[in-house]
Image: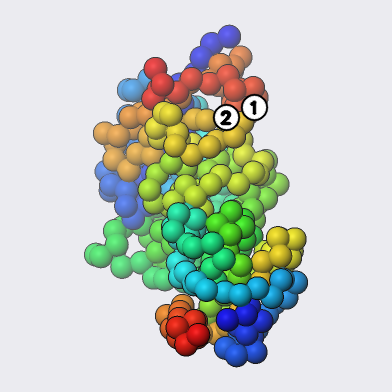
Amino acid sequence: MKLSEMSSSLGYTAVQDQFQDRDIQHGYTSDLLSDVMANAAEGSVLITIQAHKNAVAVASMAGIAAIVICNSRPIPDDMLETARSECIAVFTTPKNQFTVSAEVYNRLQAE
Amino acid sequence: MPWFRADLHLHSCLSPCGDLECSPSAIAVTAKQRGLDLVALADHNSALNCPAFAEACRREGVAALYGIEATSREEVHLLCLFATVEQALDAGELFYRALADVQNIPAKLGDQVYVDVDENILGAVEKHLVGALDYSVDEICEAVNSRGGLFIPAHIDRSVNSMGSQLGFLPHAPYAAVEVTRSPCPLDTHDYTRICNSDAHFLDDIAMRWFAYEAETVSFAALRDALAAKRVRLSIES
């Protein structure tokens, strides 16, 4: 799945769309960022409610390609600015982590 | 210059996880007995026991700071310490407004009472205090530093509610120091001054860990200077 399909196919809103439209093969769902850093696969989509710039810092260190913020959690501007400078895509959705995980998983499995 | 012994992370009966025996006056008496020169009260997300703590410490002749252990949106615990009760109460009001609106159930979650210096209960806090504030680490840092306080990430090496557990690293920010519980600290503390405190929730645990700082006086300003100059010794390293 191309990153852009997170919007075009799954319907999540891209709030930071300055990213390279790379191919995604993994997803990781966690709200504990130390866990993300330790266990997320390189190039994953991170599904979380942690909407702050430290989430981007962890994503950057772990090689995360995109972050999906669930439950329509408000996203501060400094998070988007940091994500833009790191070329990490940020999407938002009113859906929860369980639903988004299932949707992303099914989409990746279908390939 | 003399060295002063400090334990700047103490909980009282206001913290639901704190022992009811931990009244501000009992804490002051115990701190005096254990030879501490400077103590700070830092209950979870509230400073409402600080007025009684100030009076109790005056009675015992122990110098005091007034604080809050704030929980950020990242669920990281952060020590916010002030020179005056008024500053602490002001920050406490700001934080309480931003605290998740979950009512405390004392039977299940513990009591959250604030008292006077003679241990009379003045009231109970309604919202559960061990929740997260709707403020990021950076926003809490700004709130503390703009009020002239000391901003110190708490127990950064612990497995819960710490920079280490929540983020996995220590971001750069204007910290007065960072609090560790072990030596060597498994997390990279960069060039920040390290201190250790007891984080006591029971009287028995007061001064279980402490640090000493070298200064002309025991005052807040002298402590700030000593932290900046790294004139500190940690009990866990001696």
> Who is closer to the viewer here, B164 or B213?
B164
Rendered position, B15 above or below A90: above
Q: Residue at x 66, y 81 (%)?
A: A4
Question: Element under label 1?
Answer: helix
How dense is the environment of label 1, judged by Cα within 10 Å: few (below 14), some, or many (20 and up)? some
Instruction: Give residue B158's position: percent from left, percent from top.
Output: 40, 44
> Who is closer to the viewer here, B238 or B105?
B238
Where does label 2 land, which residue?
B193
Rendered position, A86 above or below B118: below
Question: Which residue extends farthest top?
Answer: B1
Quick one: quadrant of the N terminus of chain A?
bottom right
- Residue type at mark 1 is Ala
Task: Answer left or right for B168 relative to B32.
Answer: right
Figure label count:
2
- Residue type at mark 2 is Thr
How dense is the environment of label 2, judged by Cα within 10 Å: few (below 14), some, or many (20 and up)? some
Task: Answer left or right for B142 relative to B15.
Answer: right
Question: Element under label 2?
Answer: loop
> Who is closer to the viewer here, B236 or A4?
A4
Q: Are marks 1 and 2 in contact (CB under 8 Å)?
A: yes
Q: Is the image coloured rainbow, by chain, by secondary structure, or in one colour?
A: rainbow
Where does label 1 land, which residue?
B228
